[in-house]
Amino acid sequence: MKSSAKNIKLTSVDEIFSTEESRTDANREKVMELPLAELYPFKNHPFRVVDDEAMRDTAESIEKYGVLVPAIARPRAEGGYELVAGHRRKRGCELAGKDTMPVIVRDLDDDAATIIMVDSNLQRDSLLPSERAFAYKLKLEAIKRQAGRPSKENGDQVGHNSFGKRSVEIIAENAPDSRNQIQRYIRLTELIPVILEMVDTKKIAFNPAVELSYLKPEEQTLLLDAMDSEQATPSLSQAQRLKKFSQEGTLSVDVMRAIMSEEKKSELDKVTLPSDKLRKYFPKSYTPQQMEATIFKLLEQWQKRRQREQVR
């Protein structure tokens, strides 16, 4: 009869005398104080870290109270740690003169890390359209891969996952934007960088930008020249027509310039009163607000007088 001794697992002394509480504590995530020099940015991180007033406030808070919420990072194969959440906190620590910061280290695959990275930033109010656009796109691709589907470049941006829900619907459950708005943001990633920058700086409005995203990259480049020559940016109706001509295969530079040279309705309805011409009718001490109030008061009196004359 063969001995079964080799199948017997002996309990170690430490396991015999350890309590359930201590074993649970050993498996619990630990906050580690890591050197800033060992923390590297997340690959393809879409969120900008800018030394603006908000960052100065963050640095001041860290200097006074320290980092109240630990960052999240994962080990790098080449050494150090890749930040998943906490890029702004790291910069705040640098500005505050700190050498380390508290970090929770987790073993995360690329998709899980991407989802955490996006979710930890999406709730910020100050996000630029380009930041939100690429963040949604990264998370969408990660969710699709987790559901077992290969990512298709320029393919359907919706898709269904293994739970029967559309991937965009899953994102919308924990996002400040609706499903349709998320899809519209993702469209912005099809814009060439120069036009996307114009969206971030509010030179081109969001809705026209979504329509322009359907233009081919080479058409978008030609549109830049048309906008420059006409010193104008597309309105929503103009962008929709540019998209229509592009889909029909008839969008040319001449068509672009003809559309961009049109006077917009808002410009046709606008009345401009030069301040230098108005000044001669008012005392020098009058502010622009006082001038405006006086003009509207006189217009009201003129309107009432016309109404009385019409009654007679």
Image (cartoon, rainbow, N blue to C red):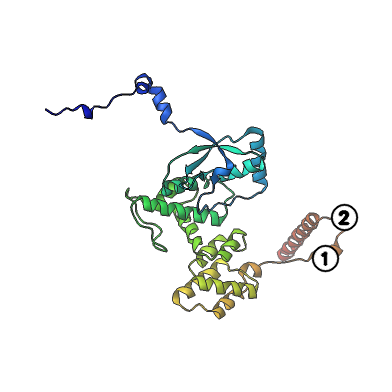
Residue 40 appears anywhere in the view: yes
Provide residue 103's location: percent of width, then percent of height: 53, 37
Q: Residue furthest front?
A: 2
State the quadrant of the C terminus: bottom right
Q: Please, what secondary structure does the residue beneath circle 2 have?
A: loop
State the quadrant of the N terminus: top left
Q: Residue at x 50, y 77 (%)?
A: 251
Q: Please, what secondary structure does the residue beneath circle 1 have?
A: helix
Q: Residue at x 63, y 37 (%)?
A: 62
Provide residue 77's location: percent of width, then percent of height: 45, 47
200 or 76, nearer to the observer:
76
Q: Which residue is mark 2?
A: 285
Q: Residue at x 44, y 49 (%)?
A: 172
41 or 154, nearer to the observer:
41
Q: So how many labels did they put on this image?
A: 2
Label 2 Cα crowd, 10 Å radius (few <14 / some 14-19 / many 20+): few
